[in-house]
Amino acid sequence: MTTMTMASGRLVAVVFSLTPRHTHAPTKVIQIPRQRTLSTASSSNRANVKQNVTITSENCERILILGGGIAGLSTARYLLQHTQQQNIRANITIIDRNIDILPTANTLPSLYAPHEARLHKNIPSRRNGNVLCPSLTVPWTTRSLWNEAILPGLKSIVRSSEPTPPIAFDWPSLMSDKDMWSFGTHFLLQKYLIGRPEHQSNKSILEFSMKCLDDPSDDLVQSIEYGRCATGTQLGDGTIIAGDSSGDIGLFCSGLMDRLMNSSFDNGGQLTMIPGEEASMLHLNDGVLHGVTTIDQFGEMRTREADKIVVALGVNSSSVCKGIDVPCPVYPVKGHLATVASKTDYKYNLTLEGGIGYAAPMESLDSDGRRLYRLSGFVDFTPNKEVDFHRVNALLGATRKYLPDAELIDASACHRPISADDRPLIGPTVKFPNLFLCTGFGSRGWTIGLGSGKVLASQILGMPCDIDPAPYLPSRFRWSVM
Ligand SMILES: Cc1cc2nc3c(=O)[nH]c(=O)nc-3n(C[C@H](O)[C@H](O)[C@H](O)COP(=O)(O)OP(=O)(O)OC[C@H]3O[C@@H](n4cnc5c(N)ncnc54)[C@H](O)[C@@H]3O)c2cc1C
C-alpha cells in the first residue's frame, strides 16, 4: 500500500494494484480513498493486492468515466477492447460515489438471499426488473399523451374506485422543479416539432446490444454468470414475443467490473476504479473542458483532470451537465420492484394486465424450492424515493392472475434515467467535443447498456461505429431550455 502525491498536488490517494503476479506491471490499478480498505473486493482480488504507482500521462490518453453503472462499465469494457486491438495506450478511470460498489463474489447464487436483494437497491444497474426486452422498440414519445397519461390521471382523481393509473404525476412537487419544466419542454419539442420519423425507434440499439451480449467471440462477456433465463415475453392475449429473455443486471455489472479489474494490458494502458467519490462539477479552462471536481466521503475535494470525460451518471447526469450549460434532458422517473416466490414455473416473462409492468422469472429458487420472479412497473414522476405499497400490491394483484400462490419476498422503488424522447444519449456533446454522454437509458438500460457502451467507445476513439449513431446523438437536444 503506498500513499502518494502527484506532481500537481491534486491527487492524494492510496493505490492498490490488482495485477496478477505473473503479468507485467503496470497493468491495472484500483484507487480508493485514503484510510479505506478494499472490504468488498473478492477474496481473490484481495490476495493480489500489492504496491504500485500510477504511471504518467505522457503519450497516453486520459479518459475519465463518471458513473460505474451499466453505462459506465460497458463504455470501459469496449474502450479496453478497442485500445488493446488498435494498440492505443489509454488511462481509463471510472469514478463512482458508492464506496461499496466493488464486485462481491460473482457466482450465481442457487438460492435467493434477501439481504443481497437489498444491496444498492436505489441504483437501477444493481437491481431492476430483470427483463431483456429487445421487443420494446417504441419510445413513449410516440404514444398518446392524453389517453395514457392525462385521462387516466383525471379519472382517478374524480373517481376513487378507478385503478391507480400506470403513469402518475406528483404535481405539487413537480410544479416548482425547474428540471421538470426543462424536461417537459424538450419532450414536447421532440414529440411535436423536431423528432424525425426515422428516429422514432430504439430498434437498432436494442438489437445491437443483444448481439453484444450474445457475441460468442467475446470471452469476457460470456464468462459472466448472470442467470439468463426466460425464452420470450407473453402478452396479455397469450401471444409469445420471441427474442426477449431475463437476467440479473446486478450480477452482470458485478461480474463485468470483476473481469475489467482482472484484465491484463499488453500495451501499458491502465484501468483505475475510484469508488467513494462523487462528481460534483465539470471544469473549464479558457473554455476547454479539462476535468471534474470530486468530493469523497471525508469531504475532501479534488480536481481530476482528463483529456476526455464520459458522463454516465444515470439520473444525476443532467445536474452535472447543467453546471456547464450542456443540454442533457434526463429526468428521474420512479418505478417499483418486487420479488415473489411461486410454485408455478413459467419459462417466459409475463406482461401484467393494464400495461402496468412485467413479471420476469429468475434463475434462483427460494429455500422451499419455489421459482422466484422479479416484478417491475409503474411510472411515477415524483422526487419521492419511498416504496408505495399501493403500487406494490397492484403489481402483486396483477401477477396473481398467472401465479395465484405468489408470495411477496421483498419490495423496493428506484428512479429510471429517462430522456425527453425516450431514446438514449450516446456520443459527444456539441459544445465540448471532449465531453461524451452515455445516459438516458430509461426503462431499457439493462437491454441497451452493452451496445451503447460499444457505440460510445468507438466514437471516443474516432473509430467507425457498428450501427448508425445518429438517432442517439446528444446533438438532437440543441438548446438549453431554462
Ligand atoms: C424499477 C426499474 C425497473 C427496470 N427494469 C428494467 C428491465 O426490466 N429491463 C431493462 O432493460 N431496464 C430496466 N430498467 C432500466 C435500467 O435499470 C436502467 O436504465 C439502467 O440501469 C441505467 O444505467 P446507468 O448506468 O445509466 O445508470 P445507473 O444504474 O443509475 O448508474 C449510475 C452510476 O453513477 C453513480 N453516480 C450517480 N451520481 C454520481 C455522482 N454525482 N458522482 C459519482 N457517481 C455517481 C451511481 O452510484 C451509479 O452507480 C429498470 C429501471 C428501474 C428503475
Image (spheres, rainbow, N blue to C red):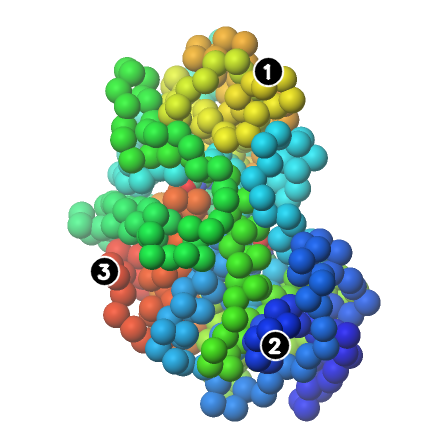
Q: What number is the disc on residue 407?
A: 1
- Asked if residue 461 lies left or right of residue 272, the reply is left
Image location (x, y in percent) of residue 117: 63, 35
* Cα gap from disc 3 to disc 1, whole angstroms: 45 Å
Give the residue pinned by disc 3: 468
Q: Nearer the viewer, residue 283 or 202?
A: 202
Amino acid type, label 3: Asp
Ranked by sequence position, the earlier of labels 2 and 3 is 2
Amino acid type, label 1: Glu
The 10 Å Cα crowd at callout 2, few under 14, some 14 to 19, many 20 or more, is some
Q: Nearer the viewer, residue 394 or 376?
A: 376
The 10 Å Cα crowd at callout 3, few under 14, some 14 to 19, many 20 or more, is few
- Looking at the rendered image, the disc whose residue lies closer to the viewer, 3 or 1, is 1
Against 273, residue 26 (above or below) is below
Ranked by sequence position, the earlier of labels 3 and 1 is 1
Quarter that holds the N terminus? bottom right
* Cα gap from disc 2 to disc 3, whole angstroms: 32 Å
As helix, strand or loop, the secondary structure at mark 1 comes to strand
Does the Cβ of the disc 3 residue fall within 8 Å of ligand 1?
A: no
Image location (x, y in percent) of residue 82: 37, 71
Amino acid type, label 2: Arg
Residue sticking out furthest to the right: 35
